[in-house]
Image (cartoon, rainbow, N blue to C red):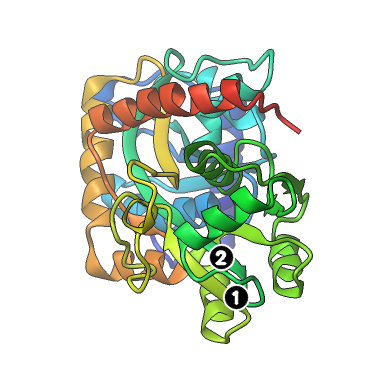
Amino acid sequence: MHVYPMAASAGSMAATAVVALGFAAAVAPLAASAQSWPSKPIRIVVPGTGGGGDFAARLIGQGLSPVLGQPIVIENRPVGTIPGELVSRAAPDGHTLLLSASTLWLAPLLQANVPYDPQRDFTPVSLVTMSPNILVVPNVLPVKTVKELISLARRRPGELNYGSGAAGSSNHLSAELFNAMAKVDIPRINYKNPSQAVTDLISGQIQVLFYNASTVIPHVQSGKLRGLAVTSAKPTALAPQFQTMAQAGLPGYEAVATFGLFGPAGLPAPVVSTLNAEVVRFLQRPEVREKFIAAGSETVGSTPEELAALLRNDVARFGRLIKDANLRAD
């Protein structure tokens, strides 16, 4: 658990009190009116530690704590459905929030008995970041374009392999969408540690990988890998040298990693409005944008309605893909 206090000069006694308050908020949240919000520390629940969501939550916590006048506690929980379940059951008073990737709303499509309804049990606040993947291949593979990769895969069905992390992750769905739209058969190799897939791609043990720009671009620059396209609908500042998948031969292709900020269902409108305004204002700061780009993602900052629409569209679009490809959680 990490706490971002209102003032950097707070002593150890104050820090201990903040942690205690954060724990108390987790186990016994008290109702608070929208007019008095925030009346105690705010906790942001994040799946996992050290990833893109964790990074985003820490920056947001540092930026919003002085503005909102309360410490912000970053609470890391195991990746999976636990963070969503925890926040869905929290009091809708604006003191418990969730920063999560699309796995939050795609989980019910991949597994049974998910303990929340992503469209019913949460209040969207803002889309925070988006990160396209880069389609990369080993430099020894005889393809230099997306069209050449498609042609090779059609000539050798089932012979090439792609690596990915957990089912439903952005690199997994990026590859499955490519299979479906390009009408090719490139089987999946599942990696518990996705970074190992990069190593195996360089050595030629796998032939295709969709992965984040900050990890693969150094290998592209060194000549170990060849980048073919980005998975976003528009060119990205993270990798401006690459075409989009649509430009490279697959019109309509788009698959990006996204992180959104949510509260429990029933979050008061004034709280949503204030949170949204402050989050968007923070994400628009040039120095904040630069920090996110250096870490491999682009800031967005959307209206709650835009985040809700993205969720609905993802569920519909990837729901069809998941059903057609018979994808299931690992």
User: In the depicted view, which residue is nearer to us: 249 or 51?
Assistant: 249
Q: Please name the residue shown 25% across and 40% down the image.
A: 302
Q: Amino acid at mark 2?
A: Val
Which type of secondary structure does the marked residue at label 2 adopt? strand
User: In the depicted view, which residue is nearer to us: 150 or 281?
Assistant: 150
> Pointer 2 and pointer 1: residues touching (CB < 8 Å)?
yes
Circle 1 Cα neighbour tier, 10 Å, few/some/many (<14 / 14–19 / ≥20): many
**Is residue 254 found left or right of 323 in the rendered image?**
left
- How far apart marks 2 and 1 lie (CA) works out to 6 Å
Circle 2 Cα neighbour tier, 10 Å, few/some/many (<14 / 14–19 / ≥20): many
Q: Amino acid at mark 1?
A: Leu
User: In the depicted view, which residue is nearer to us: 140 or 101?
Assistant: 140
**Is residue 318 found left or right of 310 in the rendered image?**
right
Classify 190 as above or below 330. below
* Badge number at residue 225: 1
Judging by the rendered image, the residue that carries numbered circle 2 is 136
Residue 317, percent across and down? 43, 27
